[in-house]
């Protein structure tokens, strides 16, 4: 998922048309007007998602239904105007429309219009009502704002640097889940009750057992499915200890990646005068010879 | 929450009045008398909270009710005297009264007096009884004591340094919770039983689904709500793996922050004679040239 | 479990027979043909395990039974041919047959043939059907592929370096589980109901209590067994806090091991010209004097 | 808990009496005979605890009761002989008797003798039977064995170094548990059913609510108690996120402690010839100038 705007920026010339100015406000966040636009947009997104949430609670919908529908239309028209503006000022409109945010922006306004169509059935209406919550995906634009951007990038880099190790770890988890799931299906599945009838145990197929294995290994432990035979309990206990211990490994990996990233930032700051390194990120003078960094 | 006393210290002069002396004992913890006062106060706080706890257990209240009420009045009068003393010796009494600890100190004594009023209803009495447990907030004064203060500050600094990364992490968690909650409402909600009646599933509104999403993602997993459809189980399994893996990221961040803080303490200790660094916190001589640090 | 091929490589000569060429393709992954063979094999393994999974779901078996049996025979014959090829081209066939992968490869094909025998009972058939899922163990060959190999080795080394500390940790966990399990059996077991009958509590024997202790200490918490007496709940709460805090220790150990491993890689890279160290893994020139590393 | 033998070692002279020789075998683990004694003892402890476990399972006790009683007496007599030998060869027998291991060693043999007394009631017999499991505490002697000792000490030192930070952390957890527990008692407790009767909710007293708070904060989540009101669920969700995030802090602390401990070991090894540091623990020569370390 590419969180950055993958729309080309129009070339900066002297005779900046309204389209270029609009582009800077709507797509970028480095001018005051651009930041203001993004903050207002984020507030509108959060409010509109709150409306969707409240509408899903039956008692609230029955009481304040009209108000919520009104608010919904207000936000939909607002987002429609914004969508139109984005298409109008993007240098390559089609590229925006088919980008990640382009699709999400369309999904954010479409359901309300579809519900208003007379051909939409009631079941579809309910589904479309909920789909509007996906407009929260637009909130990922929050990471475009200044301070957030640096930190989000630092996080992404550390996770990216650890990706190969995490892939090995996840392969191991998935293989464990399938094998323990199959073993539990063998041990706990197919039990019969007193009348010789098959008894549902939650381990009646390998996919069901795998669901149990994931619930157990991640230490969630709903308890909707749990082993009853002695052998099953023993195997489950082993799997819990495995899950409890296994979380250690990726934690260690990512910790080391972060520590290294932090170290690198520090070591890379070298005083040009005495060549001493290890200066803090916020240092302004070399701490050994006093030269300005 | 500012845990340090934000009351101005009276200027140290030669003719120290009783108010200044009382201030040093009541508000500060750097004289033996001040430490003793704080230790006795903490003991009284813990005992009074224990009394509140015991009073909430019906069988104990029925048997030892009189004794507990007596103890309660003893602590309330003690805390009232202390509150009066604090107002009397604070250089700016109003500033203390409206500070965090001033409000908490008042809340610690008010309920007992309100309960004694004849106009308080029984329902209010029960509520006020419980509110007294909030006096445990006063126990945060424990971090004022010498050894605790350094460590509490070190912890706070490391958490503070990681705040931006943790904010990005929490944004991601909240957005995930809303989106997965909405998706589960779509998948699991609105099921009908054999008679065509709506069946309560725990996914009947987006806020309910979000509650489930938090229970699952934090690996608490009560099991009071759990998915029953195959698609719901598959999505739940993915969310568990996400929650299981996501805890890694902030752990890594904070580990790196702590490691860096520890490193910084060490690197900053430089021998003035040979300029060698890396001396331990408890070192008294340079380990390379023997100069006293 | 030795994940690397423990079969001797035939000596590389000029007149490479077909057996030597086949060996390079089947057992190794450093030629394009060898990588292709492994990728195709992994795809076949995943597909065949998917077939086993689908077959275990009753509704799918009833509808697509014939198709699944056909797919099953296709994969079995494919794996049989592969097994024969491995025996034919291994320099020491017996050594391969009794190696970890040799046994797993045989287990992957045997069940289908056994089911086809007329003497196999229906109960055995179901068991054999599930055992086929063990062929996923063959998927561990994925770690032979280039990029995975380095990372898997790095992970293994860090875990191996921490093995003694982890052993001490696990000893402590197991001893805690036995002691808390016995204590809970003493506290919660043997309760009687109103008629003086023994009431099953899930703490009726020490092994059952130990199962509960593992479920609690690993923070899985099914809730199928939970304490009901006040003393039992207090002890359980202490154990939860212990389990919650204890995971910290091995995480810290492994984090430090990983950080040290990363550090070692970096420190060991020394520029031969200026003797400066600390070069990153991907650096090509010394960052101090510019000499090629 | 002092895990090391706190019994004074007899002075090493030339005319070593049998008591001194016995002491070296029974209390120490640095001679081959001493190691052998400890390994045999550990095996006997594990076997005797296994007997206790099996005896607590009713079906096994009914079938193999006689055999288990016989094994129990065998181990009890063996441990009695060992206890006598320890008293006989300890330089200060009383000091051993009242040390941690002295008490545990006595507890390991006493129950069997008490059960044999005619005055012991059946209820006491069951209790004494279970208490024998405490002899597993003797297994902590495992940490006296060579390789384990170093690692156990390293672990203890890192945990000890982090004790002040962990104390601050635990204070914060306990205060949170009390405050959230009281708040949930206020919100969820005292609900009435349709007939105006008090409904048990698991939040009926502050201690019960605190049990729930511990179960939730440690992410165990049995589900035997869970909130039902909207406000209660919201507060519970906040507490889960707090518990999920809070585990990060001590993990970070301990990680940093371990990393620092590992670093210290490395930095402290300095080559006496060129003063270069950073040599690995297993290095025998300086990696810069080749001088033997």
Image (spheres, coloured by chain):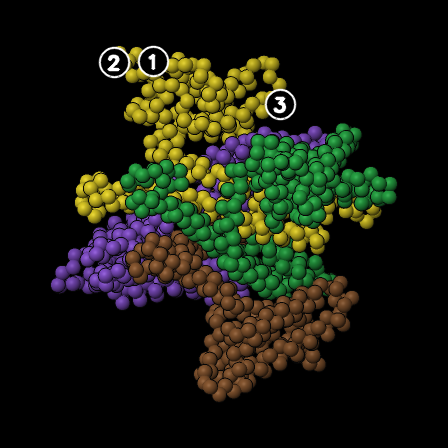
Chain colours: A green, B yellow, C brown, D purple
Q: What chain does badge 3 belong to?
A: B
Q: Would residue B180 be seen by someone viewing this image from the given angle?
A: no
Distance of mark 3 from mark 2, alpha carbons? 55 Å
Q: Is residue D78 above or below residue D241?
A: below
Circles 1 and 3: CB atoms closer than 8 Å: no
Say which residue label 1 marks.
Answer: B19
- Coordinates of residue C103 in the picture (x, y in percent): 54, 76
Looking at this view, is B291 or D71 the one in front?
B291
Q: Is residue C136 above or below residue B273?
A: below
- Coordinates of residue A204 in the picture (x, y in percent): 68, 61
Q: Marks 1 and 3: same chain?
A: yes
Circles 3 and 2: CB atoms closer than 8 Å: no
Distance of mark 1 from mark 3, alpha carbons? 42 Å
Find numbered disc 1 in the image and state the secondary structure of the residue it sits on.
helix
Q: Marks 3 and 2: same chain?
A: yes
Q: Label 3: few (<14), some or many (≥20) within 10 Å?
A: few
Say which residue label 3 marks.
Answer: B123
The numbered mark, 1 or 3, whose residue comes first in the sequence reads: 1
Relative placement, left or right, of D58 versus D46 is right
Name the disc covering residue B14, or none. 2
């Amino acid at each position: 998922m590419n969180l950055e705007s993958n729309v080309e920026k129009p070339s900066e010339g002297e005779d900046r048309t309204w389209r270029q100015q609009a582009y800077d406000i709507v797509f970028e966040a480095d001018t005051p007007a651009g930041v203001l636009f993004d903050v207002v947009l984020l507030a509108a997104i959060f409010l509109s998602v709150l409306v969707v949430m409240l509408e899903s609670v039956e008692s609230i919908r029955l009481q304040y239904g009209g108000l919520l529908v009104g608010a919904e239309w207000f936000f939909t028209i607002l987002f429609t105007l914004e969508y139109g503006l984005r298409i109008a000022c993007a240098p390559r409109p089609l590229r925006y429309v088919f980008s990640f945010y382009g699709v999400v922006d369309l999904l954010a306004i479409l359901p309300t219009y579809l519900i208003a169509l007379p051909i939409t059935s009631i079941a579809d209406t309910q589904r479309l009502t909920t789909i509007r919550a996906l407009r929260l995906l637009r909130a990922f634009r929050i990471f475009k704002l200044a301070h957030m951007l640096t930190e989000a990038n630092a996080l992404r880099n550390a996770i990216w640097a650890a990706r190969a190790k995490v892939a090995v770890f996840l392969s191991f988890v998935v293989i464990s889940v399938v094998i323990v799931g199959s073993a539990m299906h063998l041990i706990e599945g197919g039990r019969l009750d007193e009348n010789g009838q098959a008894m549902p145990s939650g381990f009646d197929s390998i996919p069901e057992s795998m669901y149990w294995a994931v619930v157990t290994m991640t230490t969630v432990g709903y308890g909707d499915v749990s082993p009853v035979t002695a052998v099953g309990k023993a195997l489950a206990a082993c799997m819990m200890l495995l899950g409890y211990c296994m979380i250690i490994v990726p934690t260690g990996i990512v910790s080391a990646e972060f520590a290294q990233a932090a170290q690198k930032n520090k070591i890379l700051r070298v005083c040009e005068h005495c060549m001493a390194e290890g200066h803090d990120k916020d240092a302004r003078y070399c701490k050994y010879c006093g030269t300005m960094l």
